Amino acid sequence: MSEVTFNKGKIPETRLPNEDPSFEQKMKDLRDNESDDRHSMLLSLASKNPESIAIWCVLGLSSTDRMESYAYFRVAYHRGLDSLRKNGWRGSGFVRWEHESNRYFLFALNQLAVISREIGDYAEAERCSLFLRQLEPNWDQLQIDSL
C-alpha cells in the first residue's frame, strides 16, 4: 500500500506503489530489445498488466507514430490517476519526482503536454503542464527527457 503523508500545516504528498520488480525487469528488457516483434511483446506484457503505468509509458516511448504515443501516454496518465486515488490522493497535493514510484505517472503527464502542443491542442497542453507543476513544483528544474 502506498501512503499519503500529512504534515501539520503542509500540503499532503502521495507516493504511488512501486511496480513489481520482476515485471519491471521484463519490461526494461523488452524496452532495450531491438527485435522486430518488440512492440507485440510489449503489448502482450501490457495485456497481462493493464494497471501498470510503466508499461504504457514504455509503449509510448517505443512507438514511432505520434498519435499512437499520445494514446499510450494518455492510458498511462489515467492508470496513474486511478492508482493515485486508490492510494489516498483526493485531487490535490504533491506527487513528487523524488519518489521513484511516482516517475512514470509524472513522465506520462509531461509527455501528454508535449505531444498535445505538437498536435496543436494547446488547451490540453496547458492543462497538463499546469497540473504537472501543481503536483511537482520543481518540475522545470528537473530536466527530465526520458525514463
Image: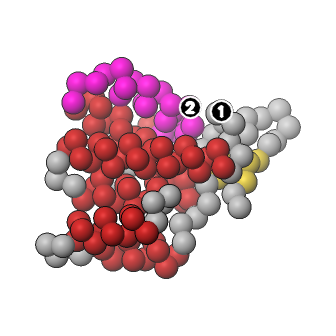
Look at 31% across and 36% down and name the residue there. Answer: 114
The secondary structure making up most of the magenta span is helix
Give me the disc on residue 102. none
* Camera sees residue 106: no
x and y, in percent, of residue 89 in the image? 68, 42
Q: Are marks 2 and 1 in contact (CB under 8 Å)?
A: yes
Horizontal relation, residue 107 to residue 12: left or right: left
Give me the disc on residue 92. 1
x and y, in percent, of residue 19 in the image? 53, 66
SS at badge 2: helix
Crowd band around label 2 with a 10 angstrom C-alpha radius: few (<14), some (14–19), many (20+): some
Q: Residue furthest right?
A: 8
Horizontal relation, residue 51 to residue 108: left or right: right
Q: Is residue 138 above or below residue 16?
A: above
SS at badge 1: loop
Horizontal relation, residue 137 to residue 33: left or right: right
Magenta segment: 119-139
Give me the disc on residue 134. 2
